[in-house]
Each structure stands twice: as structure tokens, then as C-alpha cells.
Amino acid sequence: MDNREQFIGLWGVILGGSSGFGFAAIEKLALHGMNIVMLFRETAGVEKVLNEKISLITAKSDVKILLINANALNEAGRDLFLEKFKETVGKDGKIRLLLHSIARGNLKPLVSGGVSDNDSGEMLSIEDIQLTTYAMSNSILDWTRMLLKEGLFYKDARVIGITSEGTHKYWDSYAAVSIAKASLESLATYMAVEFATYGLKTNLIQAGISETPSLKKIPGSKELLQIAKTRNPMGRITTPEDVANVIYLLCTDEASWINGSVIHADGGEHCR
């Protein structure tokens, strides 16, 4: 089989694909014949630029890429996805991949005047934690259940989420995201067991520190990048393309026995 036709007729749903790991995954998977639906929440100006980038991708790959500018974190957004997907694909479209790459959370310290050098005076509230946890963790369950209920998953499908080293180490003002990622890691374990009977394999990728728009929002991100380069055995930081390559590998037939894993895509950065 031509490698460009590897996933022909199959679809990937990318939640949060306007930049970083999500967009890199779109570029990679399209080259191997996977059609894509990308949900994102951006301004009209950003959407225009995205459409231009997507046009370049589809010009190189014989795939369909459907962009939906909607809130993936509420029922209205999920309903709009179903409407657009069924209009575009019909009843025969089958989803090989659900990639949860939403980076939407609150970056505040637990206490004003605490240990952070980037203290703005704002403290993390319980509501901040709840919103961040739903955005970066629990929403993956709502999407998986919905796609399963609608019968849209391929018989051998993948559910992939993104976690980070900040789940297990202290980073300034990262508490809400760390809590969310810890929740995601626990949730993925249960999903790997309970959704296996439906042919779903649920895995997480712990990406190395990478210079993405999401990272730049974290206080002290420049220091994190420098430390990562020093720690990494490969002598460089992780790129979105590195992570996209692992996402692609998990989508292959050969990866069908990988389920319930946290895979480090960091060049060995976590070893130091």
C-alpha cells in the first residue's frame, strides 16, 4: 500500500488543533491519507490564516480537512460537530482517531504572595480548577462517549490525550493544569479498560517541553526551555513534529496492542 493511502477513508478528530501538537498532527496524518476534522476556538483573523495553511496541506495530500470554529467544551459545540460531520461525510465516515489537544486553563498561584516569582496578585479559585480540569481532562470523556453513541468510531480506533511533566513537578502558577493532567492520567486508565470492549485504545503522550503558544503563556517558560535543552540527552528541545510522529505511530495497525499507556515523546528528557 502506498504510504500516502495508509488511512484512506478514515477520519481523525482533533480537538484544539490550531497550533502546536494538534496542528503538527494534522500535517503528519494528512500525508498518510487521514481525513481530518479540526475543532478550534479562535478569532476570525486567526481562522483566515488557518484556512490558508490548511489549503496548503490539502494541496499536497488527497484528503478532506473540515474546520469548525466552535467551543469543543460545551454541548452546542459537540452538536455542531455532529451536524457538520454528517453533512460532509455521511453515514459511512469512520473515526480512527480522537486527539484531545485542548490547552485552555488558568495559570495562577495557589496563594497571593506565595513562592512564585511571577505573582500577579491573583489567586487560583476553585472555579478556575474546575474549568481547567474539564477543559484539559474530563471533556475527553464526553467526546468519547458521544462518538461511541453515534456509532462514528472505526472498529479499531484510538483516543489520545496530551499530558506533561508539570503533572509531577512544580512549575510556577501551573497548579490548575497540573491537577487537570493528573486527573487525565487517572481517567485514561479507566477509559483504557472500560472502552476496550468497543475497540478503543486510550493512551496519553507525555510531551517534552516544546516551544508552543501554550508553553509561552506559562510564567518562567523561557527558563523551562533552557533547562529542557540542558537536560535532554538529545541536546535539543522537543518539537511539535516529534510529538506528531508518535501520534501517527499510535494510529498505525501495528500499535493496536498499546492501550492504557503514558508514552514519553521527549528524547529522554524525563530521565534526568
Image (cartoon, rainbow, N blue to C red):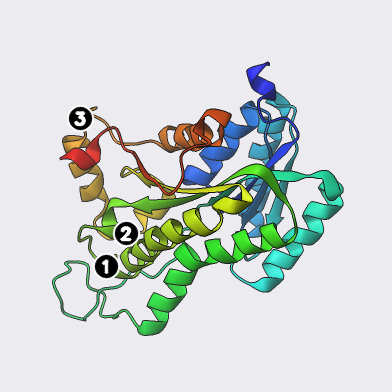
Which type of secondary structure does the marked residue at label 3 adopt?
loop
- Marks 1 and 2: in contact by CB < 8 Å? yes
Which type of secondary structure does the marked residue at label 1 adopt?
loop
- Residue 236 appears in which quarter of the rendering? top left
Q: Circle 2 is placed at which residue position? A: 218
Q: Is residue 116 left or right of residue 60?
A: left
Q: Is residue 240 visible?
A: yes
- Rendered position, 127 above or below 140: below
Q: Residue at x 32, y 42 (%)?
A: 208
Q: Circle 3 is placed at which residue position? A: 233
- Rendered position, 243 above or below 108: above
Q: Is residue 49 left or right of residue 178?
A: right
Q: Nearer the viewer, residue 121 or 254?
A: 254
Query: Which callout, 2 or 3, points at the residue further toward the start of the chain?
Result: 2
- Rendered position, 185 above or below 26: below
- Marks 1 and 3: in contact by CB < 8 Å? no
Tell me which amino acid carries mark 3: Pro
Label 3 packing within 10 angstroms: few (<14), some (14-19), many (20+):
some
- Residue 190 appears in which quarter of the rendering? bottom left
Q: CA distance from mark 2 to mark 1?
A: 7 Å
Q: Nearer the viewer, residue 242 or 223?
A: 242
Q: Circle 1 is placed at which residue position? A: 173
Label 2 packing within 10 angstroms: few (<14), some (14-19), many (20+):
some
Query: Which callout, 3 or 1, points at the residue further toward the start of the chain?
Result: 1
Q: Residue at x 76, y 60 (%)?
A: 82
